[in-house]
């Protein structure tokens, strides 16, 4: 947590040290059962992976132990670049990011994560300024926790975010079937149109994802610009129109008479087709 202030909680460290020690044998499934047995009645299913990103080794360890004792599988990274490498190894269900880090600050890391993945982010920061909170919550994060904080607060906020996203958070979903002529894979950035696979750029994929997850609803130009482009990238409505035009040229049977991506002039765009998600994996619609 660098200059933001440590979680200097000796009592917390002492409290954690008093937790039951569990001998784990038999691999990951046995470890999960053992951890569940040691949670003293906490009704949390140990199925979520969380990535903690913080340059302070002691803070990482404290956060890791808090979340592990709450029943989560935890990975850690000491910098933004290391976190991006970890994301290539496996996508977590949630990322906890400290803002004040060298090499790559927390906002930049959040920007890079959100430009490629729809994984929820919880920001940790000693910066309580309204401007910082607004930027974090509007552009990147599902929650913003000001330090210092109690361990119960951290666990409760993490649980709340994961309840909203469900098990689909951070999970590579199977391809989404729109109809017989169009299937989309948002993770690998491609669409299959009449049996022919076409490549989508990351921005095209993000735009299409935002429209599909809100199928039947108009997503405003402002929302698309804020969500599909990172904070330090130039985003403007003419650029949005160009990307929508390119998307239509790739997925529409007749781009001049679109049936999938329809324009609400002066407002935004709507994905008009019914979306067939795998059972139980329909994404949470966001406010647009």
Image (cartoon, rainbow, N blue to C red):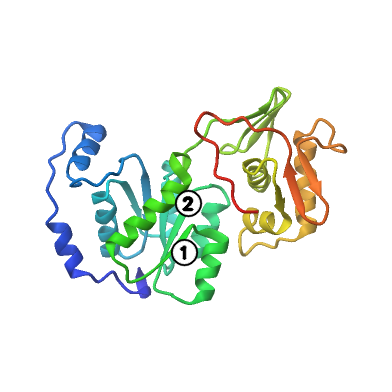
Residue 173 is left or right of residue 2, and the answer is: right
Q: Would you name the residue on which mark 1 appears?
A: 106
With respect to residue 233, does 171 lie above or below? above
Secondary structure found at label 1? helix
Q: Quadrant of the C terminus?
A: bottom right
Label 2 Cα neighbours within 10 Å, binned few <14 / some 14-19 / many ≥20: many
Marks 2 & 1, CB-CB < 8 Å contact: no
- Which residue is most to the right? 256
Label 1 Cα neighbours within 10 Å, binned few <14 / some 14-19 / many ≥20: many
Secondary structure found at label 2? loop
Residue 237: percent from the left, percent from the top? 77, 58
Q: Quadrant of the N terminus?
A: bottom left
Residue 121: percent from the left, percent from the top? 46, 55
With respect to residue 148, does 181 lie above or below? above
Task: Between residue 67 and residue 57, name the one nearer to us.
Answer: 67
Residue in the image at 70% along x and 59% along y: 222
Residue in the image at 42% along x and 68% along y: 102
Residue 172: percent from the left, percent from the top? 50, 37
Q: Is residue 104 visible?
A: no
Residue 163: percent from the left, percent from the top? 42, 47
Q: Tell me how far mark 2 sits from mark 1, CA to CA.
A: 14 Å
Q: Residue 122 has which mark?
A: none
Residue 22 is left or right of residue 265, and the answer is: left
Residue 30 is left or right of residue 184, and the answer is: left
Give the quarter of the image for residue 247. top right
Give the quarter of the image for residue 204. top right
Residue in the image at 27% along x and 46% along y: 71
With respect to residue 201, does 17 lie above or below? below
Q: Would you name the residue on which mark 2 appears?
A: 120
- What is the tally of numbered marks visible in this picture? 2
Residue 37 is left or right of residue 125, and the answer is: left
């Amino acid at each position: 947590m660098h200059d933001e202030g440590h979680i200097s909680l000796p009592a917390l460290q002492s409290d954690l040290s008093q937790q039951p020690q569990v001998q784990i044998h038999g691999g990951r499934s046995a470890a999960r059962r053992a951890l569940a047995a040691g949670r003293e009645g906490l009704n949390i299913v140990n199925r979520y992976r969380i990535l903690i990103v913080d340059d302070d080794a002691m803070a990482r360890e404290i956060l890791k132990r808090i979340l592990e004792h709450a029943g989560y599988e935890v990975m850690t990274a000491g910098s933004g670049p290391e976190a991006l490498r970890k994301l290539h190894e496996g996508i977590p269900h949630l990322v906890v990011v400290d803002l004040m880090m060298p090499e790559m600050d927390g906002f930049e890391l959040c920007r890079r994560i959100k430009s490629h993945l729809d994984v929820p982010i919880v920001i940790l920061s000693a910066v309580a300024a309204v401007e910082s909170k607004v930027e974090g919550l509007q552009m990147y994060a599902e929650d913003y926790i000001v330090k210092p904080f109690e361990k119960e607060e951290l666990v409760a906020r993490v649980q709340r975010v994961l309840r909203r996203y469900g098990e689909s958070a951070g999970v590579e979903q199977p391809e989404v079937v729109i109809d017989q002529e169009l299937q989309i894979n948002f993770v690998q950035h491609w669409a299959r149109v009449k049996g022919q696979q076409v490549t989508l750029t990351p921005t095209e994929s993000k735009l299409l994802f935002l429209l599909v997850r809100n199928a039947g609803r108009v997503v405003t130009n402002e929302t698309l610009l804020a969500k599909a482009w990172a904070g330090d990238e130039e985003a403007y409505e003419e650029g949005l129109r160009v990307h929508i035009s390119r998307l239509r040229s790739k997925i529409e049977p007749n781009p001049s008479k679109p049936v999938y991506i329809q324009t609400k002039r002066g407002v935004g765009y709507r994905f008009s087709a019914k979306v067939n998600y795998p059972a139980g994996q329909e994404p949470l619609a966001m406010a647009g």
